[in-house]
Image (tube, helix red, strand yellow):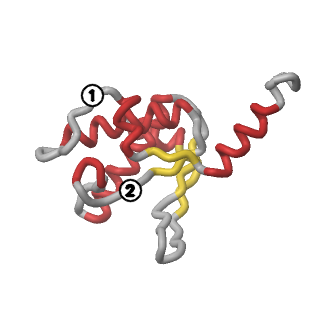
Amino acid sequence: MRKWFFLFIDRLFMLFTTPAGITVARIYCTHETREAFELLWTKFWDTVEQVTGRPVQFKFMDGKGLLAILVDGCKAQADGCGDALLKQNAKRKNTRITETDPRIIVQYILRTCDIHLDRYFQSSIQLVPTHV
């Protein structure tokens, strides 16, 4: 499993933004598969726990912690995140979530980047017939 992590993750950037919101990391994946993204999310959250000594907290699971995960809208990215979130939820003794479907649990936290969403709509508009 460890060698997959290094094959799939191209770069990890740590940067900080405004006090209104903080970007903890940007991760770029070279393979857009569900398995690759599940591994990416799992290893990232495991790494945060190793570095800080505390597990990543999610507001929807723990009542405090991350409010959202911003992604570009790739289906494999969302599915892999859902799989990884189910694993995170299973580790918790006092979780507030009983969901077992990765396609549902991911809806609590995943958000699509406005720029990527706009690009998708703009490219989709060309597929609509002009008489509609």
Residue 59: give x, y in percent of width and height. Answer: 30, 54
Secondary structure of the residue carrying tag 2 is loop
Taking the image as shown, residue 28 lies to the left or right of residue 64, namely: right
Please name the residue that numbered disc 1 is placed on: 100
For this orientation, the residue located farthest to the bottom is 19
> In the rendered image, which quarter contains the C terminus?
top right
Which residue corresponds to the image point at 63% horizontal and 51% vertical from the top-left?
A: 114
What amino acid type is highlighted by mark number 2?
Leu
Q: Quadrant of the N terminus?
A: top left
Camera-nearest residue between 128 and 40: 128
Single out the residue that lies furthest toward the front. Answer: 131
Q: Which residue is nearer to you in this view: 10 or 80?
A: 80
Residue 21, x across and y down, in percent: 48, 69
Tell how many labels: 2
Task: Judge the density around disc 2: few (<14), some (14-19), many (≥20) Cα neighbours within 10 Å.
Answer: some
Left or right, residue 18 beside residue 100: right
Query: Which numbered marker is on residue 67?
Result: 2
Q: Which mark is residue 89?
A: none
Q: Element under label 1?
A: loop
What residue sits 46% from the left and 29% below the top?
A: 35
Q: Looking at the picture, does residue 18 appear above or below residue 52?
A: below
